[in-house]
Amino acid sequence: MRYRIISNTPLTAAVHRMVLAGDTASLRRPGQFVQVQVPGFYLRRPISVCDWDADTLTLVYKVVGQGTDAMADMAPDAEVDLLSGLGNGFDTGLMGERPLLIGGGVGLPPMVGLCRTLLAEGKHPTVLAGFNTAAEVFLQDAVEALGAPFVLATMDGSAGIKGLVTDAMAALDFDSVAACGPLPMLKAVYNAADVPGQFSFEERMGCGFGACMGCTVQVKGGTKRICKDGPVLMREEILW
Ligand SMILES: Cc1cc2nc3c(=O)[nH]c(=O)nc-3n(C[C@H](O)[C@H](O)[C@H](O)COP(=O)(O)OP(=O)(O)OC[C@H]3O[C@@H](n4cnc5c(N)ncnc54)[C@H](O)[C@@H]3O)c2cc1C
Ligand code: FES
């Protein structure tokens, strides 16, 4: 579907926020993603939906290669082709009353839409974000504007608690977790909290909608396609 760029602005030196106008009816759950058609590139780029409303959706992405670099150059009013509403997303019905939403680096964006959804359901989420250093921190304002606590951990201690997100978890009160971020972070969170958990995984993708099998991973009891059956896996099914 075609979307129009409303804004595309830097949040930090490497991370940008793109707000797009268009149909959001296909978005059912936080944690779903879109496949962005970047002009000049054959493969689409998968990016999580940070948040959405009736007629806009927001993507927050880090420039790591040629495709995301080209995204950062896209100007307001340009049209973008997206495959939207992809993946399963987080199931808020399986979360407790006090969920801890953990985002590492560019794993943080989907936690904004998840936080908003949980608050609307009357739950009491806390967002825990991990970065390397204070200069990399983004979306703190977006979480705080929702009215949820935002706990920060940085590796160098330049903002928030010094250390990993798992170092900050010990002092927090929660009954379930949702996590998105680098694989070592997901594994550390899994080991640190034996509570109901949902973990969002990244995998290199081809089609993005379940047809090519290019993103298949082993889970307990079989295989799953991260694009279609994920990106969110339940704690019980994960094989590390
Ligand atoms: C479900 C999902 C959600 C994601 N959400 C976000 C997000 O919200 N914000 C964000 O900054 N990044 C996100 N990513 C990672 C993002 O897709 C890659 O950083 C991006 O595709 C890199 O493209 P590139 O052309 O700049 O890099 P290149 O390295 O030049 O890309 C080359 C190819 O590898 C693929 N690729 C590279 N890195 C990844 C990766 N980590 N995961 C999957 N494919 C990759 C690209 O799509 C492209 O096909 C997500 C990935 C997945 C799978
Ligand atoms: S990327 Fe094609 S099946 Fe997942």
Image (cartoon, rainbow, N blue to C red):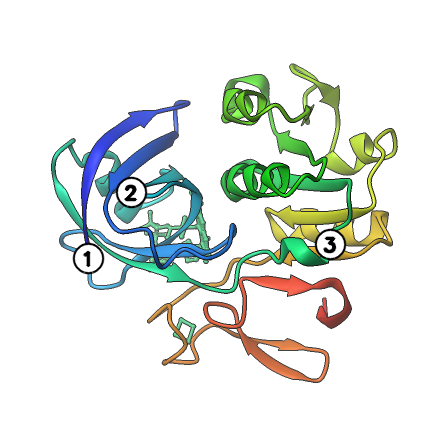
Q: Pinpoint residue 102: horizontal percent, then vertical percent.
A: 67, 40
Q: Pinpoint residue 15: horizontal percent, then vertical percent.
A: 40, 31
- Is 180 placed left or right of 164 in the picture? left
Label 3 close to label 2 by CB (< 8 Å): no
Above or below, comparing residue 180 to residue 237 in the picture: above
User: Which residue sits at x=14%, y=52%?
Assistant: 39
Q: Residues within 10 Å of mark 3 (few under 14, many from 20)?
A: some
Q: Residues within 10 Å of mark 2 (few under 14, many from 20)?
A: few
The amino acid at mark 3 is Lys
Q: Is mark 1 within 8 Å of ligand 1?
A: yes
The amino acid at mark 1 is Phe
In space, the residues marked 1 and 2 are separated at their CA atoms by 27 Å
- The quarter holding residue 167 reads top right
Tag 2's secondary structure? loop
Report the residue marked by disc 2: 55
Report the residue marked by disc 3: 187
Q: Pinpoint residue 179: horizontal percent, then vertical percent.
A: 65, 48
- Is 209 placed left or right of 228 in the picture? left
- The quarter holding residue 150 reads top right
Q: Earlier in the sequence, mark 3 or mark 2?
A: 2
User: Which residue sits at x=30%, y=35%?
Assistant: 19
Report the residue marked by disc 1: 41
